[in-house]
Amino acid sequence: MRSLLNSLLSYFLTPGGLLLMGALDASVVFFLPLGIDFVLIILTARKPELFWLYALLATAGSVAGAGVTFWIGRKLGEHGLARFVKPSTLKRVEHRVSHRGAISVAALGVIPPPFPFTAFVLTSGAFRLSAWTFLSTLAGVRVLRFMVESALAARYGAGLLAFMESTTFTAIVIGLAALAIIGTIVSAVAVVRSVKREKRAARMGSAAA
């Protein structure tokens, strides 16, 4: 188990892995709070001279993932959002999205977890906000967030690299990996169950008609 986690960590701690993590971070099922930030900071600590490149890769992955999620929201429409967003969260998000423009909503992407970023992206797509305005604004605020993080990591990375050799860091990595696996499975199961319920309800409605 530990060797598998080490292999996964080794993959994600590459430029390609950073790009993928950015995309997964904005997906509807993957769950790892601050995962993209974690990978970005470690990569920058290892090669501080490439801090700008890592920030751009994280932004590109994040915007690409958000674009797919935005498209899913547009296909779902307002009535299909309940498949992916908890009712308590959905009501609050719908209220904010319906009262703000694409720029204002996308600008919220600078806020780290536990802010429900994916729910906002889905709902923005479902409410048919301007995709270009939303994603371009999101790119701007994300590159700002990641540039600040990577610049700090480049400045203070030496201490972080020393910490990465400790058993405490290993325990943290294992804990985060377990959290990601469990959270992703729970999210995926919830989505599948919701889709099945909708299909069952549709069949019953057709039969009744």
Image (cartoon, helix red, strand yellow):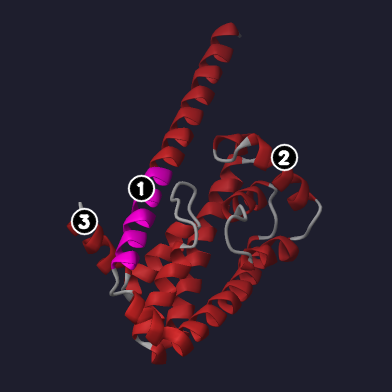
Under circle 1, the secondary element is helix
User: Who's the residue at 50% across and 66% down the image?
Assistant: 62
User: Image quadrant of residue 209?
Assistant: top right
Judge whether residue 104 is colored magenta.
no
Name the amino acid type tagged 3.
Arg
Residue linked to disc 1? 181
Residue linked to disc 2? 91
Image-based side of 181 in relation to 10, left or right: right
Name the amino acid type tagged 1.
Ile
The extreme top residue here reads 208
Magenta range is 167-184
Image-based side of 184 in relation to 99, left or right: left
Under circle 2, the secondary element is helix
Name the amino acid type tagged 2.
Lys
Q: Is the magenta stretch mostly helix, strand or loop?
A: helix
Q: Earlier in the sequence, mark 3 or mark 1?
A: 3
Query: At which x and y percent is residue 18?
Result: 38, 70
User: Image quadrant of residue 77?
Assistant: top right
